[in-house]
Image (cartoon, rainbow, N blue to C red):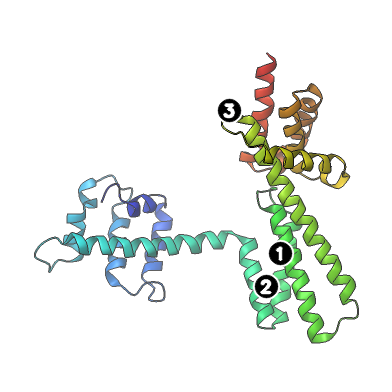
Amino acid sequence: MEGSVLLKIVKTLDKSQLGDLLKFSNSPYFNEKGEIALFISHLQKTYPFKNQDYLSKDYIYSKLYPNDKSYNDSKMRQLMSATKKVVEEFILIEQLRQDEFTKNSYWVEYYRQKELPQGLQPKLKQLEKLMAKPKHIYDGYHYHNFQLSTLKAGLISTQNLLYRNKNFTKDYRLELQKSVHHLNKFYFLEILRFACIKYSHSLLFSSELEIKIAQEVLEKVFSNEDYLNTIPINLYAYALKLLIEQEDLYFFTLKDLLAEHTHKLEPIEAANLYKIICSYSIRCF
């Protein structure tokens, strides 16, 4: 079984998670096959997976099917495939539990469809709180803001149908404007980020279309104070300017911005930006 996708996935889980996985597999709602739960129980007992004898398909098969006279590879493969699906389902649910935005947005949409404002409003407030004070400006931050504004626009529309809001036109237009604004920020950031990758790896990229779009985005960002003050759009805008024009002005501006705002970024984001100014420094030397 060593080298199988199933075992590779299981090895990504720690001891505590394996215990939760076993509880998950013992729930008839998620798994109706008893041999899968037994299989996972066996894998849990072999943690941290050092003894290869206990992980061989022949050995595991003999433990799971003691009444079979000989090893059946087809049966074992089917069991491994079914077990893999249960493990993936467990990981999916665990990932969703950690994603507060997606979790609460699903609740908002569910309560909206079921016309339960008592359940909807607390989840909506939780979403607004998450976006107002994020731990870091992460990859999907601006897109999540777009989703939140879109959700709120949908709620305003639904509530107007039910209660006839006299401020409907004004409120609805405002949320739609916010949606477009946040979507612009998301796409501007992605274009600038990938343009920086392109210039950093110029030997591997040669498309002209992305250059033109990136130049247009740069012009928009540098002519709009809101975009130029938005993290990390401003960081990537100065990074791209530095990569294209190779001027000290952009180097020092980006260095100062990073010194001021690095703590607001995810580590991988900050590292990528620091690589750009380090590369420029090396070229200068």
Asked which quadrant contains residue 37, the reply is bottom left
Of label 2 and label 1, which has the lower sequence position? 2
Can you identify the residue that label 2 sits on?
108
The answer to whether residue 72 is left or right of residue 242 is left
- Report, in whole angstroms, how far the alpha carbon at label 2 lies from the one at label 1: 9 Å
**Is 94 rendered above or below residue 279?**
below
Secondary structure type for disc 1: helix
Secondary structure type for disc 2: helix
Of label 2 and label 3, which has the lower sequence position? 2
**Residue drawn 27% across the image and 68% down it:** 35
Residue 190, horizontal then vertical, whole percent? 68, 46
**Residue drawn 70% across the image and 37% down it:** 211
Q: Is residue 85 visible?
A: yes
Quadrant placement of the C terminus: top right
Residue depth check, mark 1 versus mark 3: number of the one nearer the observer: 3
| Residue type indicated by callout 2 | Val
Residue 178, horizontal then vertical, whole percent? 81, 61
Can you identify the residue that label 3 sits on?
203
Asked which quadrant contains residue 97, the reply is bottom right
- Report, in whole angstroms, how far the alpha carbon at label 1 lies from the one at label 3: 42 Å
Asked which quadrant contains residue 179, the reply is bottom right
Q: Are marks 2 and 1 in contact (CB under 8 Å)?
A: yes
Can you identify the residue that label 1 sits on?
127
Secondary structure type for disc 3: loop
